[in-house]
Image (cartoon, grey):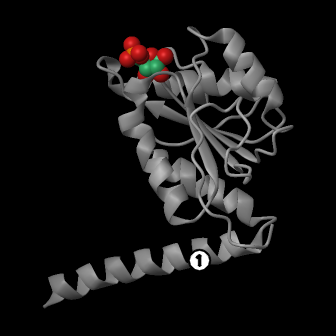
């Protein structure tokens, strides 16, 4: 696992990888309407060369698919799951109930209630079933947290995270320089 892993995108998490490279992160979401929020996570994982898959899994509309996905994820080699959903956002919590893997929940802002409904649905998990919840619509942070998690056992991902942080610091310092001039 020390080698640089190229990105792989699978549209069906129940399929075997066509590229013979198993995804380490799985991004799932309740609806294709969540994609505009969740694609930022895919961009980060691509930038950091993390093999990932991305697909739709709905807690309410495809409960059997969700069950199969949750039960099989660790057996397929997935290490971290990012789950995004809006409204009555049960997907991250239900997936966390079905898998021993770390699950990061992304509350997606819907057309009503400003996403607070999704946030509360995801963050208020009962004791014993954790979901690491990021800010509303912040799938970027979900992907960065996934990379950090992988970094605890794949050191090259820690290096990439450190570079990302250095770059972010330089950008902010550059803006301060510009303002001070
Ligand atoms: C949730 O319902 C989805 O995660 C989505 O955020 C929301 C609305 O879904 P659509 O009606 O746009 O398919 O399950």
- Residue drawn 59% across and 57% down? 7
The one nearer the camera, 13 or 31, is 13
Relative image position of residue 160 (x, y in whole percent)? 60, 74
- Residue drawn 82% across and 25% down? 71
> Mark 1 sits on what residue?
162
Relative image position of residue 88 (x, y in whole percent)? 50, 14
Ligand 1 shows up in which quadrant of the image? top left
SS class of the residue under badge 1? helix
Q: Quadrant of the N terminus?
A: bottom right
- Residue drawn 81% across and 29% down? 72
The one nearer the camera, 65 or 41, is 65
In this rendering, does residue 157 appear at all?
yes
14 over 155 or under it: above or below: above
In this rendering, does residue 126 appear at all?
no
Total tally of numbered discs in the picture = 1
Is residue 142 found left or right of 154 in the rendered image? left
Quadrant of res 4: bottom right
169 over 77 or under it: above or below: below
* Residue that lies at the very extreme toward the bottom in this rendered image: 181
Relative image position of residue 79 (x, y in whole percent)? 76, 48
The one nearer the camera, 141 or 52, is 52
């Amino acid at each position: 696992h020390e080698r640089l892993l190229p990105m792989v995108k699978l549209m069906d998490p129940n399929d075997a990888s066509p590229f013979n490279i198993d995804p380490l992160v799985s991004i799932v979401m309740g609806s294709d309407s969540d994609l505009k929020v969740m694609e930022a996570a895919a961009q980060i994982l691509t930038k950091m060369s993390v093999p990932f898959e991305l697909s739709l899994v709905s807690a309410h509309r495809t409960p059997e698919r969700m069950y199969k996905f949750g039960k099989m994820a660790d057996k397929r080699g997935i290490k971290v799951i990012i789950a995004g959903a809006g409204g009555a956002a049960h997907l991250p919590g239900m997936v966390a109930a079905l898998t021993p893997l770390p699950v990061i929940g992304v509350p997606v802002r819907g057309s009503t209630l400003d996403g607070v409904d999704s946030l509360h649905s995801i963050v208020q998990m009962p004791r014993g079933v954790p979901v690491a919840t990021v800010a509303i619509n912040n799938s970027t942070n979900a992907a960065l947290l996934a990379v950090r998690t992988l970094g605890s056992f794949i050191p090259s991902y820690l290096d990439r995270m450190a570079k990302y942080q250095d770059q972010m610091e330089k950008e902010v310092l550059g803006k301060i320089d510009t303002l001070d001039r």
